[in-house]
Amino acid sequence: MPPSLLPATPFLLAVGVSLLPGGPWLRHAAAGTALTSLATVAASRVAAAPPSFQAINSAMLWCGLLLCLIAVAGGWRGGHRATIVPLAVALALALASCAGVLLEGHVIPSLLAGLAGAAAAVALAVGPAARVSADATTPTGAGVLRRRGMPLLLSVFLLPSLWFALTVAGPGGMSLEGLRDAPFSPAAETLLAALLLPATLVLAGIWPFGPVARGPRLAPLGALLLLVAVRPVLGEGLDHWRSLYAGWLVLGAFVAAGGADWPRLVACAGLFAIACDGESFAWAGTSLAVIASLLSVAPGMHRLLPRVALLAAAACGIAALGVTLGIEVVYSAAMVLATVIAILRTPFPAATAG
């Protein structure tokens, strides 16, 4: 594969992983794909990087590729030779596309980074994987909170926002165009954003609002609120609060990753993508929010549909990563790390040999 097709590497690996059955090596392949995606997108966005960035990014890329190799070797030893073919083909193309980039002009640093990546890959592969308890019991007395909590919180956030916006915009504020033309000052935008951004967290069921939302079923409404009201009307307010909002989403992503709660993790990623750049990549963030809503009702779906939804989430996440890295670098890397943690904590069912 020529270097010009390097950005396609994570997509190829994601497709290969999606075709695999369960087993511990599926976990290794998925974690490797996440790390490879972050390293590949970061390399494509940085033209002249310092040696420290090159070393860290090369180590992360090597680690991801080696985890995929460990997955192929594990599947081969386990007798799943036919099922690892898609991943093996995708991995071969990925190695062909990455080898020149890794070694060209940086042979010694790349080899040292490869050793570091190998150590990290082995540590991730042989480390104990935590199992998530399937206790779905509801605490006593939580019924009232679940039934009334979301309407009350949304009323607290949305009603003052609506009153203040209509007061400033006047009679024309009843339409979106009127709100966009309203003479909001930077202070007013900052105040309104401080009320509307928490409302999106409530709608998406982001920590600590999970108990009142019962999953991110309404995450698409939170994404719509960001796209229609916050970004076009309160641009300066969003810029003012973006770092705090993104940090909250990353914290919620780590909480969801600790319990392998994929619907909430995907919802965090969707709102994060929209907050970073809702114009050029609105489709990616909105799609992640819709997928999170679908995954929240996954137990009632056919068993194939959640896997297809997660593959679509991987594609949208990789696409959004190219934008978020240019705006919130640290939080983007932290979001990928939360994804890796969720992968390692997900108890994939063992596959039968065939």
Image: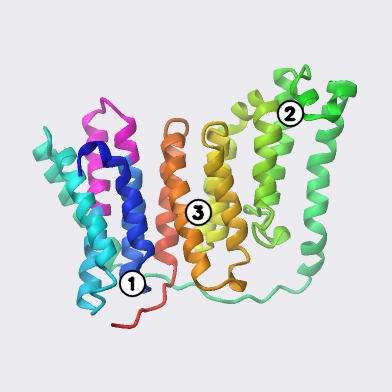
**Pair 1/2: label in front:** 1
The magenta region covers 41-64
Left or right: 86 with respect to 350? Answer: left
Q: Position of residue 339 (x, y in %)?
A: 44, 54
Q: Earlier in the sequence, mark 1 or mark 2?
A: 1
**SS of the residue at dot 1?**
helix
Residue type (three-letter) at the residue carrying disc 3: Phe
For disc 2, the marked residue is 191
Residue type (three-letter) at the residue carrying disc 1: Pro
Main SS of the magenta segment?
Answer: helix
Left or right: 61 with respect to 279? Answer: left
Dot 3, crowdedness within 10 Å: few (<14), some or many (≥20)?
Answer: many
Q: Position of residue 116 (x, y in %)?
A: 19, 50
Numbered circle sitting on residue 24? 1
Numbered circle sitting on residue 254? 3
Q: Quadrant of the N terminus?
A: top left
Q: Position of residue 135 (x, y in %)?
A: 59, 77
Residue 256 placement: quadrant: bottom right
In percent of the image, x 48 and y 54: which residue is there? 312
In percent of the image, x 70 and y 40: which residue is there? 225
The answer for how far apart the CA atoms under marks 1 and 2 are is 48 Å
Left or right: 108 with respect to 197? Answer: left
**Residue sitting at the far left:** 108
In percent of the image, x 45 and y 34: which residue is there? 323
Query: Is residue 321 located in the magenta-colored stretch of the structure?
Result: no
